[in-house]
Image: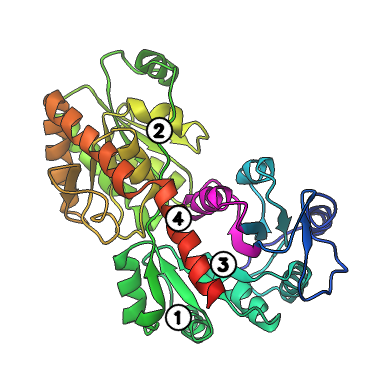
Amino acid sequence: MVGRQTVDDHSAQGREYERSTSGGCHPERGQNDPSRSFQLCGVWSDVMKRILHIIPSLDRAGAEKQMSLLVRGLPRDQFDVHVCVLTRAGPLRAELEESAIPVVVIGKRWRVDPQAYWRLRHEIDRRRPDLVQTWIFAANAYGRRAALDCGVKRLVACERCVDPWKGWLELTIDRRLARDTTRIVAVSAGVRDFYVRHGLPAEKFEVIPNGVPPAPPVSTTRQEILAELGLPPESRLVAVVGRLWPQKQIKHAIWAADLLKVIRDDVHLLIIGDGPHHRRLRQFRDQVRIRDKVHFLGHRDDVPRLMPHFDVLWSTSAYEGQSNAIMEAMACGVPVVATDIPGTRDLVIHGQTGFLVPPGVACRRELCGHTNNLLDDRPLARRLGEAARQRMRDHFSVERMVDRYARLYGQLLDA
């Protein structure tokens, strides 16, 4: 259902589009030469290929963070990268612009928004990309249709998650647009298999996993973090990081925390994130009388500062594509206990880099058991954490992810 917006909101979005299409390092509007020499921040080039990424927002969320890592990591001597944001900007805009990557915000307001579609077509026409890559359903739908109507020959769509929420309409759109899409990138074999089962052509898929940077150095001590949170100095920290909505099944984590409370008194569960189930989950926590052990921290921009001090990270999701939270925890050397689902089992090797537990209600007891073992056996926790860190370095680095996309672009553009 489309929510209401005021006239002032609409006007603000229009002004945002006008601001984002003026100034900066954008291509000149009047270029019609097919050879399209263009100026990129003062440097003229005939050889770089222009890549336009279209994404719904620049919130600090999974797909958006991966897109930012990718476009900032692509070799500048090969690719002239632009970003088109379908709905609204967000905190990631600043880091893109600091890297001199042109960003335009379309300002889509409604689920079906013809004006936004025509603004998007105008931007694609103006930038004349050699290849368009789209991210997440709204941008996959609007972006691919607009790019095709503008005559773009090379289209790459990203499918980021197993999406059981999609109904007949969404899957029909996916299948129809897949016919004219050059490649569909899935972040895991599980995502690819989901879409192939729903009728998308298997031969068009390429699996490119997410990338995670090394954990940044942290100067804040554990005792300082505990003091900030108002927790006792002997506290052990278990965390869940993610959007608070049905997919994440946070209620199971609260149940598991209640079980842990029966056998030990030092564990505190930190729930980091926000979403439509925030109020409902707080009410559930209070109903089971575990307010003293379960703490809702809301949205935090300083998760990298907190994460190295977690003793264990939990993931109770019913489905995922490839969890950024799990990858970031592993990169920090934090052992993970997570549900055994496609995407996650590509990251966590049971008993070597963490533990996998059955999804659903059955996960509660095993979350509790594995976590208690990790908290009691510090050498085990260190061994699993270090193996997890090494796995991220060896198989899921940002450099590896960027290189695979660069090679894909090269193959498609040379074809």
Mark 1: amino acid = Leu
Q: Earlier in the sequence, mark 3 or mark 4?
A: 3
Q: Which residue is mark 1?
A: 171
Amino acid type at mark 4: Asp
What numbered label is drawn on residue 403? 4
Q: CA distance from mark 3 to mark 4?
A: 16 Å
**Residue 330 place in picture, x, y as percent:** 30, 39
Q: Which residues are magenta?
A: 49-78
The answer to whether the residues at label 2 and label 1 have Cβ atoms under 8 Å apart is no
Viewer-side label of 4, 1: 4
Residue visible at 40% across and 82% down?
A: 200
Q: Which residue is mark 3?
A: 133
User: Disc 3 marks which amino acid?
Assistant: Gln
Residue sitting nearer the eye, 135 or 235: 135
| Sequence-first disc among 1 and 3 | 3
Judging by the rendered image, the residue that carries numbered circle 2 is 215
The residue at 36%/13% (across/down) is 223
| Sooner in the amino-acid sequence: mark 2 or mark 4 | 2
**Distance between the alpha carbons at the discs numbered 4 and 1:** 30 Å
